[in-house]
Image (cartoon, rainbow, N blue to C red):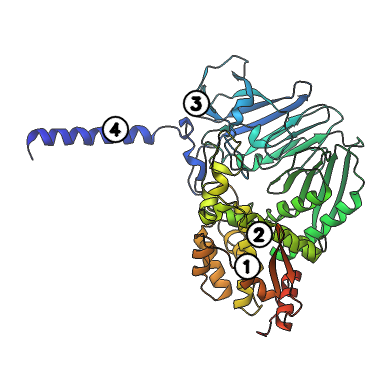
Amino acid sequence: MNFLNLLFKRKIYIFLLLTFLVISNLPVSSASDDTESEVPVSEPLEKLKIDYTIDATDTKNHLYKVTIQVSGHRSHKLDFAMPAWSPGRYVIFDFAKNLQDFQAKNRKGDELKFEKLDKQTWRVECQPNTPFEVSYKVYANDLSGTFSQLNDTHANYNGASIFMYVASHKQDPIRLTVVKPSKWKIWSGASSNSDQTEFLFDNYDLLVDAPFEIANFDNSDFRFESFTHEGKTYRIVLHHFSDFDEWDRLVESTKKIVKTQTAIVGQPDFEHYTFLLHFVPPSSLTSDGMEHLNSTQIIENSLDYLLGTISHEFFHLWNVKRLRPVELGPWDYSHEVHTKSLWIAEGLTSYYGDLALARSGVWSNEKFYKAMSDEIYQLQNRAGRQKMSLELSSWDTWLYLAVPKAQATNQPNTTVSYYNKGEIVGMLLDFEIRHRTAGRKSLDDVFRYMYNKFYLNSSKETYYLKGRGYKTEDFLKAVNTVSGNDFADFFKIYVSGTEELDYNRYLAYAGLEIEMRGNSYQIKENPSASRGQKVFREAWLTGKNIAVASK
């Protein structure tokens, strides 16, 4: 080694050492990115005191005003970012496009300097250990499960479209205060009663996971009822924009859905759950639903659609909100978050949403068969089923599933929906588990196993919520463990692969068959079904594990 090489390497060593010393002493809150989105709970971090206020009184201009007060920081700069997307809706919406009038002030009211770093991030210059606040307004005039609305009728908001977060501090506790018109009250999965105006959240992810409906509930356009099941309280809040004369059926059907799904997975770990429902005129094209930790928000134009969406979204309280893919919670809101497991999170939720309607008696068996037949018809008439697997459909959802059309594509011939195919594969997987175990186990048992292993009885691995996320291979391992069989080939063919689904092979286990009739498929009961097939079918439709004879 010559002298020049030695000198060069010493300079590199000194540079790296100095760089390490500088970086290690930087305050964690000075970073503009959001790499701490999955900070282990054991890692010590500077905690800020963060107080949010949302003012919902400017109904005429559809403008929410949000104020964020921050104290306890040691940095000269803090970054505030608006989410680019919302959990449960895997589309980049860039919510910052509706943000206006951003300001930053110290406690004396003096304006602080700030600059916009990118499309969704503002950097504020501040004094260490000196409280300050930022404020901004958000234009909101869309009623949906993703966006927000503020008008003379109500204030309805979804958190990701409204609330900025302090970069690198999503894990810090938050206090929220709501300012509203005087006679209006509040319902949310976060509220204990409709008079509550202050709320505490353990972290930012929980703040944005609680949609709010704020309105004058004495108005005849609103209905409310609560009921209990196994010690838990369930609240139905209905905002109807047209005549609604099926209230009793809605309430009774919701009770049946709650009872049936609780029997599938087990009692949920909350004190109360809130259904925020919006019934729009039949002529409206609006149809939407979104799952949340202790609530759901749904917009539909018919009771049948409403009940179907209730069943789907309610099952999400177990599947994806608590039992969740490792990539989904906590979240990085700045860009796309990819996972191969949406066919589990959404497709199997669609399966149980429909199955629960049949088990509860809200649907007849024939209506359930029709729903599954329609799903099969939809898949078989999409050429993309031969090109895209369920895993790839989950991964690539950001490119096609709910993305507004901006250019002509060949997607019908190259893609499938993990909702659609995932529901069908869920039914076939359920049948195969029941078949291989002679009716002693089912997909129900797999979900109970997963829920207990990854949520109820798992140590907390991140700041977000108890439990830990699973990977796709964990789900296969769970199926194998519960069934005592190896399902690797099934997953290789139907989850990772693109082979045609052998419907009649699996339906035959339950004495069912499918046939093409005109332009549709029809699942029907085989009149020649054996006693064992009938027992199999009864166990499936009732949710009971019944040992069945092979013939």
- Marks 1 and 2, how far apart at CA: 9 Å
Q: Earlier in the sequence, mark 4 or mark 1?
A: 4
Q: Are marks 4 and 1 in contact (CB under 8 Å)?
A: no
In this figure, which residue is indicated by the disc labeled 4?
18
- Marks 4 and 2, how far apart at CA: 63 Å
Q: Are marks 1 and 2 in contact (CB under 8 Å)?
A: yes
Q: Earlier in the sequence, mark 4 or mark 3?
A: 4
In the rendered structure, which amino acid carries the disc numbered 2?
A: Ile
- Marks 3 and 1, how far apart at CA: 50 Å
- Marks 2 and 3, how far apart at CA: 44 Å
User: Could you tell me residue 4's position as x and y percent?
Assistant: 10, 32
User: Could you tell me residue 425's position as x and y percent?
Assistant: 61, 62
In this figure, which residue is indicated by the disc labeled 3?
118
Q: Quadrant of residue 460?
A: bottom right
In the rendered structure, which amino acid carries the disc numbered 1?
A: Tyr
Q: Earlier in the sequence, mark 3 or mark 1?
A: 3
Q: Earlier in the sequence, mark 4 or mark 2?
A: 4
Residue drawn at x 79%, y 49% as measured from the top left: 306
Q: Which mark is residue 503?
A: 1
Graded by Cα atoms within 10 Å as few (under 14), some (14 to 19) or many (20 or more), the crowding at tag 2 reads many
Q: Outermost residue, front direction?
A: 518
Local secondary structure at mark 3? loop
In this figure, which residue is indicated by the disc labeled 2?
376
Q: Are marks 2 and 3 in contact (CB under 8 Å)?
A: no
User: Could you tell me residue 467's position as x and y percent?
Assistant: 58, 56
Q: Looking at the image, is 482 positioned above or below residue 110?
A: below
